[in-house]
Amino acid sequence: MRERFSVMLAALWWGSLTGLGFVVVPLLFLHLASPAAAGAVAAKLFTAQTWLSIGCTLLILLVLNKNDDPALAAQARLAMKFVVAGLLLTVLVEFGVAPRIVNARADGGNLRLWHGVGSAMYLGQWLCAGFTLWRLSSRKLN
């Protein structure tokens, strides 16, 4: 049962990153009147995504930490490394990069640089979530 719960959490984490980053935000910039309006809405959505990612990753870590099956322990440890990496990227983007994007937009700083850093880190989160989902869903479920 716990294995299925961890797969569902990983699917929610990866799916929400996929939906927001590769579907919703590009559509905002395509259909809203100005890039500034799209950016403001996207920033709020990315903040919501941050909290969803934090919740999913912490719950996945709790579930994997309780894994008593020695046959699955190695897979769980490998998945946990990617969960922790994804969690760190999530926190760094929200509390390190996002404020710099806001400041760059306000005071004419290097918006392109910080947006690129944030996008690369978001891609890193997406890869960590995808690898976690792949590893957890390939485990033998009872």
Image (cartoon, helix red, strand yellow):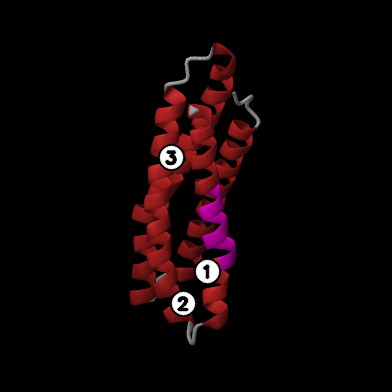
Q: Which residues are magenta?
A: 14-23
Q: Which mark is residue 38?
A: 2
Q: Residues within 10 Å of mark 1 (few under 14, many from 20)?
A: some
Q: Earlier in the sequence, mark 3 or mark 2?
A: 2
Q: Which mark is residue 25?
A: 1
Q: Is residue 55 left or right of residue 133?
A: left
Q: Residue at coordinates 50% horizontally, 57% vertically from top-left?
A: 117
For residue 30, what is the image quadrant?
bottom right
- For this orientation, the residue located farthest to the bottom is 33
For residue 94, what is the image quadrant?
bottom left
Q: Tell me which amino acid carries mark 3.
A: Thr
Disc 3 element: helix
CA gap between label 3 and label 2 equals 28 Å
20 within the magenta span: yes
Residue 88: x and y in percent read: 42, 42
Against 70, residue 42 (above or below) is: below
Disc 2 element: helix
Q: Which mark is residue 57?
A: 3
Q: Residue at coordinates 53% horizontally, 33% vertically from top-left?
A: 4
